[in-house]
Amino acid sequence: MQKKLLLTVALAAALTIPAIVTPVRSQAGEGQVDIIAWAGYIERGETDKAYDWVTDFEKETGCKVNVQVANSSDEMVTLMTEGKYDLVTASGDASLRLVAGGRVQPVDLSKIPSYETVDERLKGAPWYAVDGKSYGVPYQWGANVLMYNKAAFADAPTSWSVVFEETTLSDGKSNKGRVQAYYGPIAMADAALYLSVKNPDLGIKDPYELDQKQYDAVVALLQQQRGLVARYWTDATSQIDDFTNEDIVASASWPYQVNTLAYAHSTDATKPDIASVVPAEGATGWADTTMLGVEAPHPNCAYLWLEHSLQPKVQGDVAAWFGSVPVVPAACKGNELLTDEGCKINGFDSFEQIKFWKTPSKACGDDRGDVCIPYSEWVKSYIAIRSGS
């Protein structure tokens, strides 16, 4: 599952958006569907038999589900250029690049009746709807949390400072060499969010819309953080291993890793006791969309999966497994795995507080004009920061 991170330096937003629609040839499936997904997003009960939203779909449709796990949005964009995948569960920092780059196509919502049940906050959202066309359907959403080892923190940390600035933790040891950072340019937004509160004179309102002064401050903070970071994590499995075996005690993470590690501790007390929190500065987050490839080899099975993915049972099971929020509100009640409190616990009411991932561009989105730093520069800077240059 581990793969080398591939970084896409071209800013696809400059490309022409196509309006290509591959028609569904019949109601029958083609026998398979190939999906690029985040780890933990598509389960067939191999880790825990209770979590399986694939087997019944395969039996009912005859469409075998093949999953290619991707470890970053940049890797998803790169894989989709190959043209051999039907669907991708893209986050907001990849979705518009895929649209602008011509790698995904508009979907026919009339073939996805359950789209009508989607949370109104997500219908027609700007990270997947362009010029009145939907380039996919929502899948799950949530916050990037601060994961920590309880043995190193007497109380839950209240600030992202524990991963950006050197400090002595409750166990009497420094955090230097004991924290992680996500190996992806979009992680710069976490630093920008932290600085928006720590240094309000910078005037950062949106962590994805940074002018040169703001951007330079973010780069400086990440260069400082480099001296604290033991390792940049590139996929969920590697981070889980590091928190288990390498004395890593704090990092930005996803609820999936938190849940996996907490479950491990509940079954084996020798495993580290892990928890998570959204610090006072808030959090960035992801609102993921299942998008249809422009050259999807199996469009019929793809449409069948898109409809299946929005069923309340599926949505609730995914949310329970990943620690995310379902995009179908009906999933919040009556799901045995998620429970009736699951949506509240996972942050259903925090939608307005999350700064969802999006692709930075020159256009600042306010009266500053086209002076913000585009994603292509974020990529170059982050590579340099990680390498220590």
Image: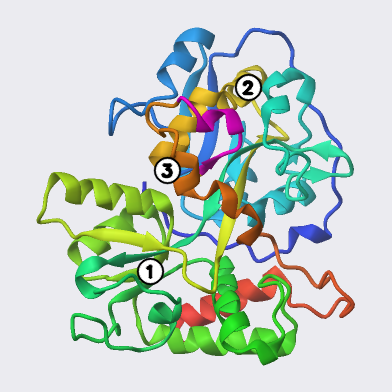
Q: Residue at x 25, y 63 (%)?
A: 243
Residue 179's tag is none
Q: Is residue 77 above or below residue 383?
A: above
Residue 346 lies, in percent from the top left, at 47, 48
* Residue on which the image places disc 1: 251
Task: Say whether residue 125 is left or right of residue 54.
Answer: right
Label 1 or label 2, whichever comes before in sequence order: 1
Residue 219 image-quadrant placement: bottom right
How did the renderer colour the structure? rainbow
Q: Residue at x 70, y 36 (%)?
A: 136
Residue 228 lies, in percent from the top left, at 35, 84
Q: Residue at x 58, y 28 (%)?
A: 330
Q: Is residue 94 above or below residue 171?
A: above
Residue 209 lies, in percent from the top left, at 73, 73
* Residue on which the image places disc 2: 307
Label 3 or label 2, whichever comes before in sequence order: 2
- For the residues marked 3 and 1, what is the alpha-carbon distance in whole angstroms? 17 Å
Q: Nearer the viewer, residue 343 or 103?
A: 343
- For the residues marked 1 and 2, what is the alpha-carbon distance in whole angstroms? 35 Å
**Residue type at the position of mark 2:** Glu
Residue 331 in the magenta stretch? The answer is yes
Label 3 or label 1, whichever comes before in sequence order: 1
* Residue on which the image places disc 3: 322
Magenta residues (range): 325-334
**Residue type at the position of mark 1:** Ser
**Residue type at the position of mark 3:** Phe
- Answer few, some or many: residues within 10 Å of disc 2's Cα (few below 14, many 20 plus, some between 14 and 19): some
